[in-house]
């Protein structure tokens, strides 16, 4: 039994935080009200000044298992999620072996049951071994509950293969998540084509490489009657393309944006800092501004980190050779607070809607809220405290993030899931 006193409750439906006591009994929210009586045997936590949110859900993470456990495991990845106030994730299938069959998916789901304290879901490949040629074992994966199909990390290059996959899998109620990139235009460089690429002397990857596939895949989905979800959008015209297709209303399209694409530009790369190397690449301030506008306007349905751990050895290589991607689970919620909620650019309602509720709706999962009768799935967040992202603080096995050793405003103090307290900061 747990009584949180004077918490400020956040909801996706209202920008107003409602101050209240919350009583949790046997993993369920039993009562909400002011000055609730303290039941015998209840633990009381003074939550005054803190915000109580439903647990976040990240629909785009790389946990690297099987095959790359030196970067991350299901255990370290899910602990990083809990550290950041996230109580559910969807893994991407670009592992080794790739998750393209019932056998590989079953192994991952079994491991996740034993090795993670939060629900871990996985997506499945569109094509065998992500090679873009033959369809993956879509029906078998669907039997194990896979909803999302993606060759993330690469675009499914052959539109005929993708169209066939879309027609086939849509009958099973599955949807497609698209990593958008024309490989012949983008090359392996992960640096925006522009002033910065000229200055650094590296041939850049133009935004049109992304925008062409955003448009192509939505057109294919329309032709197939399929639902397509556009992953990690980085460009203004990409956002505008999605906005235009959504305004037509004759195709089911959803889209996500990552915190790093809202926050950083190619200028941050400075002298080849590989902690700013990701794919799609960081673009310009005009792109960041447009993505933020798109998030506030609802062009983006969800926020997802694209958590992409790599070892220090790999990221210490030169800018061309270093792998793409940064970690995001430990840092996402605090950084959203520091850069957007605290300065008043958007409210907690947007965070709850876009990083807790909509990602679960995308996956057809129940949506938690702080309401009587709901299962306890909540995060207590201190808006006045600070978090310093030291190596010791991070639970991810890798620390390839621009936030390393930075201090930001906000702290995840408590994470509750059902009858378990998954995280409790010592300072509480
Ligand atoms: Zn991707």
Image (cartoon, grey):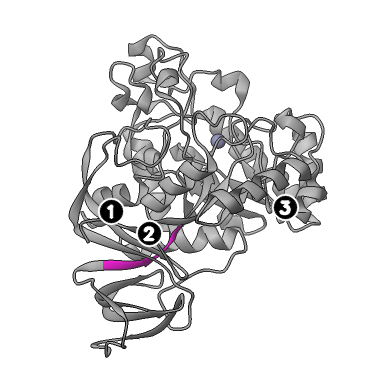
Residue 2: % across, % down: 34, 76
Q: What is the x, y in percent for residue 366?
A: 57, 69
The residue labelled by disc 2 is: 351
Farthest residue, direction bottom: 37
Q: Residue furthest left?
A: 384
- Residue displayed at 33% across by 12% down: 199
Residue 169 or residue 412, whichever sits in front? 412
Does dot 3 land on a helix, a strand or a loop?
A: loop
Which label number is shown at residue 374? Answer: none
Residue at 56%, 18% in the rendered image: 187
First to last magenta residue range: 51-56
Q: Position of residue 101 (x, y in %)?
A: 77, 41
Cα separation between marks 3 and 2: 28 Å
| Residue that numbered label 3 is attached to | 226
Q: In the image, is 228 to the left or to the right of 420? A: right
Q: Main secondary structure of the magenta part?
A: strand
Q: Is mark 2 within 8 Å of ligand 1?
A: no
Q: Is residue 240 magenta?
A: no
Look at the picture and state if 24 lies above or below 158: below
**Which mark is first along the chain, 1 or 3?**
3
- Counting residues from the N terminus, which is met first, the one under dot 3 or under dot 2? 3
What residue sits right under mark 1 in the picture? Answer: 337
Mark 1 lies within 8 Å of ligand 1 (Cβ measured): no
Distance of label 1 from label 2 (alpha carbons): 9 Å
Q: Is residue 362 visible?
A: yes
At x 41% / y 14%, what residue is drawn? 317
| Residue 384 occupies quadrant | bottom left
The quadrant in which residue 151 appears is top right
């Amino acid at each position: 039994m747990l009584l949180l006193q004077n918490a400020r409750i956040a909801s996706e439906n209202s920008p107003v935080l409602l101050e209240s006591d919350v009583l949790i009994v046997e993993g369920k929210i039993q009562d909400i009200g002011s000055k609730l009586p303290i039941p015998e045997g209840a633990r009381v936590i003074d939550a005054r000044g803190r915000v109580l949110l439903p647990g976040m859900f990240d629909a785009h993470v790389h946990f690297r298992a099987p095959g790359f456990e030196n970067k991350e495991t299901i255990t370290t990845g899910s602990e990083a999620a809990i550290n950041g106030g996230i109580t559910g994730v969807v893994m991407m299938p670009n592992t080794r072996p790739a998750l393209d069959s019932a056998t590989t998916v079953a192994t991952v789901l079994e491991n996740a049951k034993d090795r993670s304290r939060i629900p871990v879901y996985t997506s499945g490949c569109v094509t065998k071994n992500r090679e873009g040629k033959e369809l993956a074992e879509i029906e078998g994966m669907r039997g194990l509950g896979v909803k999302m199909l993606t060759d993330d990390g690469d675009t499914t290059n052959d539109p005929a293969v993708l169209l066939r996959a879309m027609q086939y899998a849509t009958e099973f109620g599955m949807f497609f998540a698209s990593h958008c990139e024309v490989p012949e235009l983008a090359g392996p460089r992960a640096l925006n084509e522009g002033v910065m690429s000229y200055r650094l002397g590296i041939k850049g990857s133009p935004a049109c490489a992304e925008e062409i596939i955003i448009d192509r895949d939505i057109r294919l989905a329309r032709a197939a009657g399929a639902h397509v979800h556009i992953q990690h959008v980085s460009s203004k015209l990409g956002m505008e393309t999605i906005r235009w297709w959504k305004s037509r209303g004759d195709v089911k399209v959803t889209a996500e944006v990552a915190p790093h694409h809202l926050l950083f530009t190619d200028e941050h790369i400075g002298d080849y800092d590989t902690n700013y190397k990701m794919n799609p690449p960081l673009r310009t301030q005009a792109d960041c501004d447009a993505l933020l506008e798109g998030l506030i306007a609802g062009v983006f349905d969800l926020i997802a980190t694209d958590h992409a751990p790599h070892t220090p050895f790999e990221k210490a290589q030169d800018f061309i050779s270093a792998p793409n991607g940064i970690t995001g689970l430990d840092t996402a919620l605090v950084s959203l607070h520091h850069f957007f909620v605290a300065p008043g650019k958007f409210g907690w309602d947007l965070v709850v809607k876009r990083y807790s509720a909509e990602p679960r709706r995308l996956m057809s999962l129940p949506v938690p809220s702080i309401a009587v009768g709901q299962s306890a799935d909540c995060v207590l967040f201190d808006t006045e405290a600070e978090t310093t992202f030291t190596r010791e603080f991070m639970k991810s096995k890798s620390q390839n993030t621009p936030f390393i050793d930075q201090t930001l405003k906000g702290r995840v103090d408590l994470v509750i899931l059902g009858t378990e307290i998954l995280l409790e900061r010592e300072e509480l």
